[in-house]
Image (cartoon, rainbow, N blue to C red):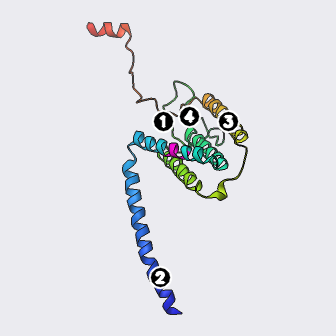
Amino acid sequence: MEGTGGSSASAAAPVNQWWQDFSKLFQYYLDKSTPHTTYRWIGTLVIASIYVLRVFYVQGFYIVSYGLGIYLLNLLIGFLSPLVDPELEPSDGPLLPTKGSDEFKPFIRRLPEFKFWYSFTKAFCIAFVMTFFSVFDVPVFWPILLCYWIVLFVLTMRRQIAHMIKYKYIPLNLGKQKYSGKKSSPSSSGSRAD
C-alpha cells in the first residue's frame, strides 16, 4: 500500500510543476498586457464575436447567453460605481466633490478597468467552452429572455445614471485633466506695467 501512495505523489509532481510554470507564464503575459488597453479590448471583441458566431451557428445555448449577459451587466455596474458609495457608507462629509469649490478627488472605481477586462474576457471564454456541452443547451424561447434582459439593463442603467447625477461623478476618463490656472484681472496686469 505504501508504494502506491508514493508513486501517485511522484506522478503528480510533474503535473504540479507544469501547472505552476504555466501559471507563472500566464501571469507574466497578463502583466505585460496591462498598459495595452486598446489591444486588450480588441482581442476581447474578437473573442466575443467568435462566441456570438458560435451561438448563431448552433442556434442554441440561449440560457448560457442570458447568464453571460447578466454577469456582464453586473461587471458593468461595478465598473461604473465608485469604490465608496456615499449612499451606503455615510461619513462626516461627502466623499465625492459636490461643488466646484470642493477639493478634487479622482474617481476610483469599485472594479478597476483591468479586472473588468479580465473578468469580461474570461466570462466569454467560459461561455464559449460551455457551448460544446449539450447539457447547457436548455430549450427556451429566446425572445422572452432578450426582452427581459433589455428591461433589466434599462432599469439598472437608469438607476446608475441617476446615482451619477445625484453625486456628480463621471466614471469615464475623458482625457487628461488640464489646469487652466488663475485668470488674471485687467487691474493686476496694469499694475505690473508700472
Mark 2 and mark 3 residues within 8 Å of each other at the beta carbon: no
Boundaries of the magenta span: 47-51
Amino acid residing under circle 3: Ile
* Residue carrying label 3: 150
Q: Earlier in the sequence, mark 4 or mark 1?
A: 4
Q: Left of 126 or right of it: where is 151?
A: right
Between the C-alphas of marks 2 and 3, the distance is 52 Å
Question: In percent of the image, x 65 and y 56: which residue is there?
Answer: 136
Mark 2 and mark 1 residues within 8 Å of each other at the beta carbon: no
Q: Earlier in the sequence, mark 4 or mark 3?
A: 4
Give neighbour class at mark 4: few <14, some 14-19, many 20+ (Cα, 10 Å): some
Residue 110 in sight: no
Q: Position of residue 70 (x, y in %)?
A: 64, 45
* Residue carrying label 2: 9
Between the C-alphas of marks 1 and 3, the distance is 32 Å
Depth check: 47 or 90 in front?
47
Amino acid residing under circle 4: Leu
Q: Secondary structure at mark 4?
A: loop
Q: Position of residue 49 (x, y in %)?
A: 51, 42
Q: Secondary structure at mark 1?
A: loop
Give neighbour class at mark 3: few <14, some 14-19, many 20+ (Cα, 10 Å): few
Q: Earlier in the sequence, mark 2 or mark 3?
A: 2
Question: In percent of the image, x 60 and y 48: which residue is there?
Answer: 58
Question: In percent of the image, x 41 and y 64: which residue is there?
Answer: 22
Amino acid residing under circle 1: Pro
* Residue carrying label 4: 96
Taking the view exactly as shown, the residue that stands out farthest to the left is 194
Q: Nearer the viewer, mark 1 or mark 3?
A: 3
Q: Position of residue 120 (x, y in %)?
A: 53, 47
